[in-house]
């Protein structure tokens, strides 16, 4: 785990570094408040040891800046200070610091306090991770999807650029659950999730939107290139199959694609993708429809009459 130490005294940095050397930590040092904030943004440390008295910016000011930054506010801050009044301690803790260690610090105490803060940080990271993952498919859940969409939309508003958004819905999926049971439906959802995730770049965010609906955030792309991604996903999903009692159960998906250039807000972008998905369903399912090019459909199904279920159970929805 990575520790960032911010202190204007080179001696204090050297001592703290020596005290922590047995903890197998990656230690990064900064000699002032301003350079410390820069290092925090650059290094994304797991914990910050922060001196209170520094000439360019006090530790309290640095802590306030850290807690006001959405990307840095979850990093635990441990104050290190020579002059420590109870008021200082209260002030530091109220600013969001997790602990306060008086200088000169005892090596064992400093190490124990750093370990304690890192343990809490680890649990906090696990909690955040679990809150963002769909347990059935392992994909990001709707909460993570919305956070990423808001983040990408804010980036576009600040710096320009574009993004695409893909909505997908499994065709006639209710029939799978009704005919074969939810355990088969769940397996198909997992297969679908894998097929979608395999097609995505590192920067894309595939997510389970809910039920049998999936979506993909595609940063920096237009609907035209996102259509190719959706088409690859559609193809891979149609190849997924599960064998149940000697029957092969298959599924297909319909896709709607939109991009930010034609959208007035994030809600509008999602509405446009949803609308394209609706037209994809209307046009016969198992296809990709983009709001950028409503007609003709981008990808026609190879066999429009093909039902998503086994041949033994043709069901009309
Ligand atoms: Mg100092």
Image (cartoon, rainbow, N blue to C red):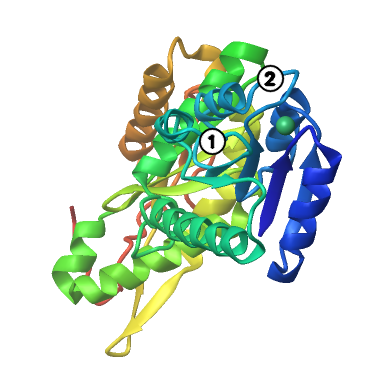
Of 139 and 50, the residue lying toward us = 50
- Residue, disc 1: 84
Vertical position of residue 278 compared to residue 299: above or below? above
Secondary structure of residue under mark 2: loop
Residue 258 can be seen in this image: no
The verdict on label 1 being within 8 Å of ligand 1 is no
Q: Position of residue 31 (x, y in %)?
A: 81, 33
Q: Position of residue 186 (x, y in %)?
A: 29, 69
Q: Is residue 199 left or right of residue 130?
A: right
What residue is at 56 percent from the left and 29 percent from the top?
63
- Residue, disc 2: 57
Q: Within 10 angstroms of label 2, few (less than 14), some, or many (20 or more) residues?
A: some
Furthest residue in direction left, as rendered: 178
Residue 198 can be seen in this image: yes
What residue is at 61 percent from the left and 12 percent from the top?
158
Of 239 and 190, the residue lying toward us = 190
Mark 1 vs mark 2: in front: 1
Secondary structure of residue under mark 1: loop
What residue is at 32 percent from the left and 33 percent from the top?
278
Q: Is residue 163 left or right of residue 26?
A: left
Say which label, 1 or 2, has the lower sequence index. 2
Q: Position of residue 288 (x, y in %)?
A: 48, 40
Of 84 and 296, the residue lying toward us = 84
Q: Is residue 57 left or right of residue 142?
A: right
Q: Is residue 185 left or right of residue 279?
A: left
Vertical position of residue 84 compared to residue 262: above or below? below
Q: Within 10 angstroms of label 1, few (less than 14), some, or many (20 or more) residues?
A: some
> Do the residues bearing badges 1 and 2 touch, measured as CB atoms within 8 Å?
no
What residue is at 43 percent from the left and 34 percent from the top?
86
């Amino acid at each position: 785990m990575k520790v960032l130490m911010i202190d204007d005294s080179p001696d204090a940095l050297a001592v703290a570094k020596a005290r922590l050397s047995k903890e197998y930590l990656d230690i990064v040092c900064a000699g002032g408040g301003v350079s410390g904030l820069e290092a925090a943004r650059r290094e994304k440390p797991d914990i910050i040891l922060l001196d209170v008295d520094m000439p360019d910016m006090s530790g309290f000011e640095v802590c306030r800046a850290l807690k006001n930054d959405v990307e840095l506010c979850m990093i635990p801050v441990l104050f290190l200070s020579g002059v420590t009044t109870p008021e200082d301690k209260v002030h530091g803790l109220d600013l969001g610091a997790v602990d306060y260690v008086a200088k000169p610090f005892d090596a064992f105490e400093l190490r124990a306090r750093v370990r304690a803060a890192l343990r809490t940080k680890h649990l906090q990271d696990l909690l955040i991770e679990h809150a963002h993952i769909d347990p059935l498919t392992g994909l990001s859940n709707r909460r993570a999807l919305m956070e990423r969409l808001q983040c990408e939309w804010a980036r576009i508003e600040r710096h320009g650029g574009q993004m695409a958004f893909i909505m997908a819905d499994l065709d006639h999926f209710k029939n799978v659950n009704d005919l074969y049971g939810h355990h088969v439906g769940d397996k198909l959802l997992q297969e679908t999730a894998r097929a979608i995730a395999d097609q995505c770049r590192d920067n894309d965010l595939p997510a389970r939107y809910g039920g049998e609906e999936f979506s993909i955030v595609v940063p920096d792309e237009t609907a035209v290139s996102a259509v190719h991604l959706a088409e690859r996903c559609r193809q891979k999903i149609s190849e997924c199959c599960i064998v149940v009692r000697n029957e092969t159960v298959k599924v297909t998906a319909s896709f709607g694609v939109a991009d930010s250039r034609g959208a007035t807000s994030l809600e509008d972008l999602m509405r446009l993708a949803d609308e394209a998905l609706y037209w994809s369903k209307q046009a016969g399912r198992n296809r990709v429809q983009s709001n950028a090019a409503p007609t003709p459909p981008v990808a026609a199904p190879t066999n429009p009459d093909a039902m998503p279920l086994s041949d033994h159970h043709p069901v009309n929805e």
